[in-house]
Amino acid sequence: MRRTPRSGVTHGVVTGSSTRVLHDVLYQPGSAYTTCVPRIAAPPKIAQPAVPSLVIAAPQRALSSDRARYHRSNPPAVSHPLDHLSTRAWNARSAALSCRQPSALTVSPIAPPYACFAPPTDADRLRPHELSPGTIFGLEIRQRPCSVESLRQELHRIRRRFPAVPIVLHISQPLDPETVHLTQLATQLHVRGAIVDPEPVGQTLRQLLTDPVDLAADVEEWLSIRGPRLPPAVSHLVGQTFRLAPDRTEVRALLGVVGESARTARTRCRKLGLPPPAGWLRVARAVHAALCLQRAPATPLLEAAMRLGYSDHSALSHQLLRLFGVRTEIVRRNLGWEWLLDAWLVRWSTCVAAPRGRGHPCV
């Protein structure tokens, strides 16, 4: 008995002149001998449904098993089932929504250069990929009185589907005690602020979105909605990184203040498939720099870079382009930090799925 290594076919050597013996050897079910006939192909495997993943390309060698496991269990909020509907299915769904009871909340999108809000519409009629970077939602409460629980659920649903879009409360009616109470509730639910007609829209939005009271707490809460879901220790580390980033340029010095060893922090991030602590420090400093540029768009880039601890204006410009994929003039024009951090996380998931090469350009 011999086996051909390349073809994988077994050749049987049969002796004797009897045709019956040869027939029994070649065709007897369960015989140990086979002829030079190709083997029966295995039944085709049933295709399993694709699992949404943070990695938008096929994981390759650079993506470890820990990262792949984490990305499979943490689908991004940007991958919403409604975003993959065909045009015909979307039109049918829009027709069904028109017959539905209107939602208690409507949104009025506004995009750069932030001249005026668009007419209010139901958030379910919008798609994230149809919105330009820097778009802001003006939230309008249509039904009053509005319960706290319904307001919380609606806001959570909108923010989870549109993580890159900051939300402000748009008040087009005269102020009354009920409106003031709703404004207080919306602020507690992480709405970025309230704008009352007839205030100048662009100037008011710039004041609300470029000077957050506690950026670190806002980032921690935003990550819990957008994903990836972080353990408490890692969430605390990310929050402290954003809180201390303006005064720290070295990751070891920052981890020393936090009370975390560099090796432990890197291991935790690596096992979860997250950017390393140095990457979080760089993006935190870049987000602070972007907010400074948005807050004072007329400030020369060199002056802003020197004040923020960069060597020159080109270092700041290259850092923004490397992390967020946009140039400084776009950062000045588009308000908010959510769209920047969302773009960085998407670029990171793309980088970890690609061959490593010279390293991750987005970290």
Image (cartoon, grey):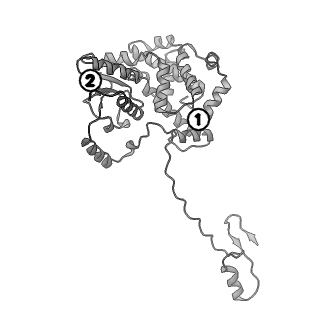
Give how far across and how far down residue 312 sits, in percent: 52, 15
Give SS at disc 1. Answer: loop
Checking the image for residue 79, the label placed there is none
Dot 2 or dot 1: first in sequence order is 2
Q: Which residue is mark 1?
A: 273
Examine the rendered structure and indicate whether residue 268 appears above or below residue 62.
above
Examine the rendered structure and indicate whether residue 11 appears above or below residue 361.
below
Give how far across and how far down residue 174 sits, in percent: 23, 18
Q: Which residue is mark 2?
A: 116
- Label 2 crowding class (10 Å Cα cut-off): few <14, some 14-19, many 20+? some
> Quick one: 258 or 347, which is closer to the camera?
258
Quadrant (top left/top right/bottom left/bottom right) for the C terminus = top right
> Quick one: 43 or 362, which is closer to the camera?
43
Give how far across and how far down residue 107 sits, in percent: 30, 30
- Label 1 crowding class (10 Å Cα cut-off): few <14, some 14-19, many 20+? many
Q: Amino acid at mark 1?
A: Gly
